[in-house]
Amino acid sequence: MAIIIVATIKAKVGKESELEAALSGLLAPTHKENGCLLYALHRKEGDPGTFVFVEKWKSQEDLNAHLNSPHLTAAFSRKEELIEEVDIASMRSLGGGDPKKAGF
């Protein structure tokens, strides 16, 4: 079963653009990782300092490798400088309705 992650990252005041650049820089290398099925960055409407990753990983092992990847480690080394708050949630689809539209 695939692993679904929703990661919400809130920038420190005045650091929104720097955080966006750092997070955007994770996209290309992560898309090349084994087991990455979806890795999409979003900004919350009406709140330019809140970013949300929606992720889908083939396995827990693939997610663990991502969490220990050099590019993610480098980005989060700037956590104290750029990030006010992080919330990472593992999700499970409940399905229902049209299977093509009800889950990832």
Image: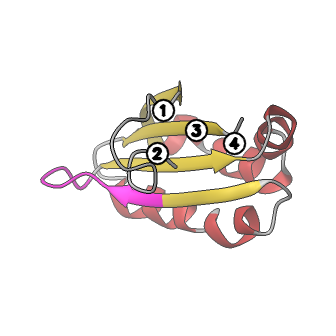
Q: Residues within 10 Å of mark 2 (few under 14, many from 20)?
A: few
Q: Which residues fall within the magenta stretch? A: 41-48
Total residue callouts:
4
Residue lying farthest to the bottom in this orientation: 28
Q: CA distance from mark 3 to mark 1?
A: 8 Å
Labelled pair 2, 4 in contact (Cβ < 8 Å) = no
- Which amino acid type corresponds to the residue marked 4 in the rendered image? Ser
Q: CA distance from mark 1 to mark 4?
A: 32 Å
Task: Name the residue beneath numbered marker 3.
Answer: 4
Circle 3: element type: strand
Q: Is residue 1 magenta?
A: no
Q: CA distance from mark 1 to mark 2?
A: 6 Å
Rendered image: mark on residue 93: 1
Task: Name the residue beneath numbered marker 4.
Answer: 77
Name the mark nearer the viewer: 2 or 4: 2
Q: Residues within 10 Å of mark 4 (few under 14, many from 20)?
A: few
- Which amino acid type corresponds to the residue marked 2 in the rendered image? Gly
